[in-house]
Image (spheres, helix red, strand yellow):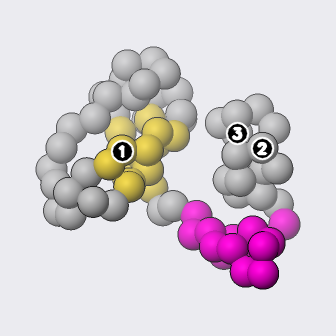
Amino acid sequence: MPIYEYKCGDCEHITEFLERLNSDSRHACEKCGGEKMSKVMSIFSATVDGKSITNSDSDNCSTCGRHNCSTCGH
């Protein structure tokens, strides 16, 4: 089962959910309980020669790895 990321429309917190392909599951935000969740594009990452790489540029948050992070405060 793939992992999908959803962004809360109320507080903008991003949460990961494990769900079946083409699932029509409804999710609530784990931070505020909001139900306005929308699926977002996940950042692809891989390891090459022991170094972590992503498909985005060097603006990634050093703590959570997201691009232009506003979620974790870094």
Q: Which residue is mark 1?
A: 17
Secondary structure found at label 1? strand
Secondary structure found at label 3? loop
In the image, 9 versus 59, the foreground residue is 59
Q: In 3D space, how far apart are the residues under numbered discs 1 and 2 (Cα atoms)? A: 20 Å
Residue drawn at x 46%, y 39% as measured from the top left: 15
Q: Which residue is mark 3?
A: 70
Secondary structure found at label 2? loop
Please name the amino acid that badge 1 sits on: Phe
Residues drawn in magenta: 43-58
Residue 56 makes an appearance in the image: no
Please name the amino acid that badge 2 sits on: Thr
Q: Which residue is mark 2?
A: 63
Instruction: Work out which residue is located at the far top of the displayed protein and give it.
Output: 32
Q: In 3D space, how far apart are the residues under numbered discs 2 and 3 (Cα atoms)? A: 11 Å
Instruction: Work out which residue is located at the far bottom of the displayed protein and give it.
Output: 49
- Name above or below for residue 43 compared with residue 55: above
Residue 62 lies in the magenta stretch: no
Give percent across and percent down for residue 4: 38, 54
